[in-house]
Structure formats: C-alpha cells, structure tokens
Amino acid sequence: MNKKVFMMKLSEIQPSQLYICSEKLSEVMKAFDANNPESIEPIPIKKLGGDIIFVDGHTRAFAAFLCGFSEVPVYWEDEELDWDAYEICVEWCKSEGIRTIADLKNRVVPQSEYEILWYERCEKMQRELEEKRKK
C-alpha cells in the first residue's frame, strides 16, 4: 500500500455502518495488540459532504475503541466507490444516533442477525439505487 497513513481521532470519524458482527469482532480482537494502536491495519476514510466517514474497517475501529484507543491509523480512500450508497448509509447512522464508533457499542450482533439487519438492508438499498439510476 502506497497510501499516506496518519493517525486520526476515532471521535472525528462518522461510521457508515449500523452494526458490528460479534464473530468478526472476536477474530479481530485475537489479532489485536491492545498496547499499540499503530498495530491496527490502516482504515480507509473519505470526506463525504461535511463528514469524514469510515469507508471500511468498522470492526477494527470498534476493537480499537474497546481497547481504549482514542486514535487509529487511517488513509484517504481514492478508489471510486458507490458514494450514493455511502451517503444513504451515513444518513441511516445519523438518524439512529450513530455519530462515532463508540455509538455502536449496543449494536454488536451475531452473524445470523448481522446478515439480516445489515446485509439485507444494504442489498435492498442497492437494488433501489439501481432502479433510480435506470430512470
């Protein structure tokens, strides 16, 4: 990875995901060095509207929060992703009071629930976006 990595406060990054999968979290926690925030694989972020958002890495960011880290290594995502979809996800988060990674603390759910609560919701939103774009 040739991207410039820097540290950023967790409290300054807006999540774009409503849930954390408990199984994935326990896997991430096993590989975690709780004494070294720089041991975390850098997390991609993007400026979207007036927010800086997590593009990916919510589970790593949440694990960092659980370990008491206030900052994580990040880099600016420069790939062209579906930013319309990210805007919708960020709106969902804001409307449910998710402003920082810490706000996901009561939203750690088993894989089976995660697939219904998150994946299915996102798939439905993607289908609706595709329909809208066809018009």
Image (cartoon, rainbow, N blue to C red):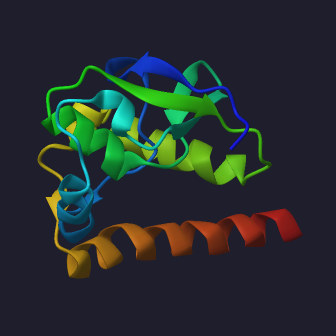
Q: Point out residue 67 in the picture as x, y percentages from the top left corner.
A: 14, 35
Q: Residue at x 44, y 18 (%)?
A: 8
* 68 or 51, nearer to the observer: 68
Q: Is residue 97 visible?
A: no
Q: Residue at x 18, y 58 (%)?
A: 30
Where, by quadrant of the figure, is residue 121 drawn?
Answer: bottom left
> Could you tell whether 69 is left or right of 14 in the image?
left
Q: Point out residue 20 in the picture as x, y percentages from the top left corner.
A: 27, 57
> Does residue 31 sit above or below 4 in this rendering?
below
Q: Residue at x 55, y 44 (%)?
A: 55
Extreme-right residue of the structure: 135
Q: In which quadrant of the rendered image does the N terminus lie? A: top right
Q: Point out residue 80 in the picture as x, y percentages from the top left corner.
A: 80, 49
Where, by quadrant of the figure, is residue 39 drawn?
Answer: top left
> Does residue 1 sit above or below 108 in this rendering?
above
Extreme-bottom residue of the structure: 112
> Could you tell whether 9 is left or right of 130 in the image?
left
> Does residue 82 sit above or below 124 in this rendering?
above
Q: Point out residue 32 in the picture as x, y percentages from the top left corner.
A: 24, 48
Q: Is residue 12 visible?
A: yes
* 88 or 110, nearer to the observer: 110
Q: Residue at x 17, y 62 (%)?
A: 26
Q: In which quadrant of the rendered image does the C terminus lie? A: bottom right
Q: Please tell me how many numbered marks the rendered image carries.
A: 0
